[in-house]
Amino acid sequence: MATFATSEQLLVIIDPAARQTDGESVRIAKDVLSAGAAAKVCLPEGPEEFARALGRRGSRRPVVVGDDRALVRAVTLLHRARELDGCALSVVPVGGTGLAESLGVPGGAVAAARAVLDGAERRLDLLVDDSDGVVLSGLGIPPEPVRAAAAVPVAAASGRPWYRSLARTLAPRPPRLSAVPAPGPSRLRVEVDGRTVVDLGQPVEAVSVAPGTGGLARVEVRPLSVGAEATALRTSGRTVTVTGADFRYRADAAVSGPVRRRTWRVVEGAWGLTLPAAS
């Protein structure tokens, strides 16, 4: 892992949803980062400005202050610009942070900011699909139900209608029932490195795929159990193809689909994330 000097210049991109959700954590993170390094703070008003700020970072190391969706957005932008190889990304989780924490990022604002300053880059494998989408942690078919999230309060007297609209757009919300049906048995063909693990004739309860180690994806298929519990099928490989009738899947923090076919391939050591040096 590559270590960083605290004198290194940082570009701190604070996601607008984070500023609305937990302004105190954002302030703490900004103060710690600014005290420990030459930090330029950027406050984008939406995804387009977020992308422009990241694209104009120059030699500064980007630090995303935001939730899991902001982290995935940053990795996606760098991947599509083919700039992941030369960029070590850092994140201070604010808001929905399950993904970032599962990757080893500390959960608190102070600890996460200190990891940005004193941590080291770890290269991680990435799943890339045939539509150029990325998966950092894992995906599941069908997507698990999402619990309703509390609405983000927006002051009516703020006098900034664009911000109210943006907050409503970015605020987490439960999916419509018509868009994401309850999980149930599916008929899917799952192929790993061209070898069929399960075919359309065998209903399955769930399929999960996650980056493993050494450029391999971990794949688990749970066949539909009738009577006795069915044994899960586990394997690994560099490419995973799933075919079926209009299936949806949850990748990291978002639900995608419906699609009838999707292929994911593992890119070994594709991206760098700053983690505590002892990790």
Image (cartoon, helix red, strand yellow):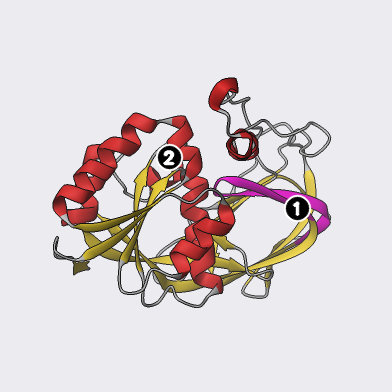
Q: In the image, is residue 223 part of the stretch drawn in magenta?
A: no
Where residue 12 sits: x, y (%)?
34, 54
Q: Is residue 104 left or right of residue 188?
A: left
Residue in the image at 57% along x and 54% along y: 47
- In the image, residue 269 lies at what x, y percent? 39, 72
The residue identified by callout 2 is 97
Number of numbered callouts drawn = 2
Residue 257: which disc?
1
Residue at the extreme front of the image, as rendered:
159
Vertical position of residue 168 compared to residue 10: above or below? above
Of 24 and 270, which appears nearest the observer? Answer: 24
Q: Which residues are magenta?
A: 243-258
Report if residue 244 lies within the magenta region. yes
Mark 1 or mark 2, which is nearer to you?
2
Give how far apart the Cα atoms at labels 1 and 2 are.
Answer: 23 Å
Q: Quarter of the image for the N terminus: give it.
A: bottom left
| For the residues bearing labels 1 and 2, Cβ distance under 8 angstroms | no
Q: Position of residue 167 (x, y in %)?
A: 58, 35
Q: Circle 2 sits in a helix, a strand or a loop, which is it?
A: loop
Residue name at image x 53 percent, y 53 percent: 138
Instruction: Assign a secondary structure to mark 1.
Output: strand
Q: Can residue 154 be spotted in the picture?
A: no
Type of residue at label 1? Gly
